[in-house]
Amino acid sequence: MQPVELDGSRGEGGGQIVRSALTLSMLTGRPCLIHNLRARRERPGLQPQHLTAVQAAAAVCDGRLEGAELHSQTLRFEPAAVRPGDYRFDIGTAGATSLLLQTLYLPLALTSTPSTLVLTGGTHVPLSPCFHYLDLAWQPLLAEMGLDMELLLERAGFYPPGGGELRALIEPVRQLTPLTRLERGDLLAINGISAVARLPASIAERQRTQALNRVQALAPSVAIELEFMPAVSPGSLLLLLAHFEHGQAC
């Protein structure tokens, strides 16, 4: 079968082209051939987190790879049938576990039996959704569409060492339902988390106080909880989840 050819320098020219291509290839069974991988980035080509996504995609579908090596700017991926099961992948850096999960979850969810993913790397790092965003904002929308998944944070992973661990329990889809969002509606409440790992509790308390001072008057109900996370290295998190009549923003 002729592969779908993609120019990796198009659009934002980053890793999302690679990840989306892998997901769509697994879903459709069509090979893909990507040139100019991450051409718009300071360090072009496959970096550890992208290479892990490529290798993980091949692992869950017995796929064939060409060009799957660090700094490679050309990749050919030929998928076979996706196999549900228990998988463990370690990025080896603080690369985002959330982006690796988003590459794999839909192909695994559309199989016939449950799967488990254990992903090691960064769970709270710049330029990617953190674990709490996935758990509180992304996963509930998936559930509304019929995609049932439970997310667990074994430990947080911050930049630069990473070392965090995310566990995803993926149930097979019984029926997909369209998601419709036409109006946001009024703001009803703001909930939040101020969390620290291997840092004094006073830092989490100061984060919460500053956030409350800024958003207290915006919604009828505002609450920010303190959370203390296990982690390899120090780090902190402030997350706000705004609940509207017909949706939410995180």
Image (spheres, rainbow, N blue to C red):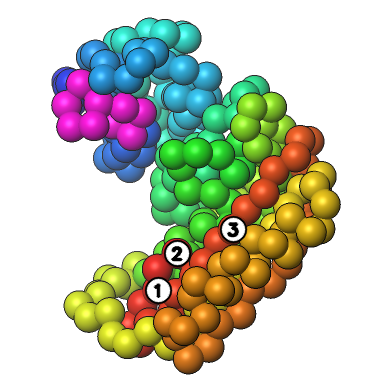
In which quarter of the view is residue 226 placed?
bottom right
- Region of the chain picked out in magenta, as a range: 8-18
Q: Quadrant of the N terminus?
A: top left
Residue 31 locus on image (x, y percent): 27, 25
Q: Is residue 179 magenta?
A: no
Instruction: Decide which of tag 2 and tag 3 comes sooner along the chain.
Output: 3
The residue wearing badge 2 is 250
Task: Report the front residue among 207 and 247.
Answer: 207
Q: Does the residue at mark 1 contact the one at mark 2 (Cβ under 8 Å)? A: yes
The residue wearing badge 1 is 248
Residue 139 locus on image (x, y percent): 49, 63
Q: Dot 2, crowdedness within 10 Å: few (<14), some or many (≥20)?
A: some
Instruction: Work out whether 72 lies above or below 118.
Output: above
Q: Amino acid at mark 3?
A: Leu
The residue wearing badge 3 is 238
Q: Dot 3, crowdedness within 10 Å: few (<14), some or many (≥20)?
A: some
